Amino acid sequence: MLKIVGSPAGNAINRDLEDIMNSLVKENGDYIISFKSSDYSAKKGGYRPVEVMIRDSQVIYVTDFTYVGSGPFAELVKGMDWDFAAGECGQTGMYFGLEEAAELWRLYQSNFVDYFKAGKFDDVTVNLL
């Protein structure tokens, strides 16, 4: 059973997201899972890359990356960042407590699961640390 490290009750992992992660990580260990869409770019937008760290069946962080800037100066940076180990959530550089982000976390999980099931992430890698 996958859990979120040190999570308040409002930040539980939804069952569908847990099923996705369990299908990718078969045993205990430290993993970084990357979800990417080859269509995503600073110019066109699209489905943003996501990185998840799992340590011994606990979600440590979920980071959603986005482009900031325009043209040749656009950089891929953290857009949304749930750092469960640190007890905070960040949105493009502004951080606040996980309790304040509980509803956003539920919505984010639901959207991510929908995108995953629709095949929007065509490059999924699992790296054992």
Image: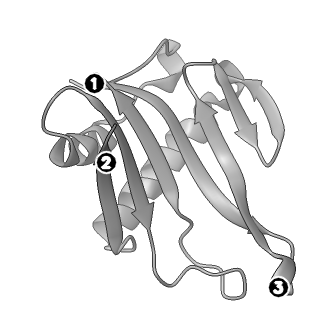
Left/right of residue 84 with respect to residue 29 in the rendered view = right
Seen at 34% across and 75% down, the residue is: 122
Query: Which quadrant of the figure contains the C terminus?
Result: top left
- Residue placed under numbered mark 1 in the picture: 57
Quadrant into which the N terminus falls = top left
Amino acid identity at mark 3: Pro
Mark 2 to mark 1 CA distance (whole Å):
14 Å
Decide which of 49, 103 is in the foreground and name it. 49
Which amino acid type is marked by label 2?
Answer: Asn
Disc assigned to residue 72: 3
Q: Residue at position x 45%, y 75% from top?
A: 37
Q: Earlier in the sequence, mark 2 or mark 3?
A: 3
| Whole-percent x, y for residue 34 in the image | 41, 56
- Mark 2 or 1 closer to N-term? 1
Q: Splitting the image into 4 quarters, where does residue 105 fall?
A: top right
Q: Which is in the foreground here, disc 2 or disc 1?
A: 2
Q: Quadrant of residue 71?
A: bottom right
Q: Is residue 51 above or below residue 3?
A: below
Cβ–Cβ under 8 Å for marks 2 and 3: no
Left or right relative to 12: residue 85: right
Q: Quadrant of residue 43?
A: bottom right
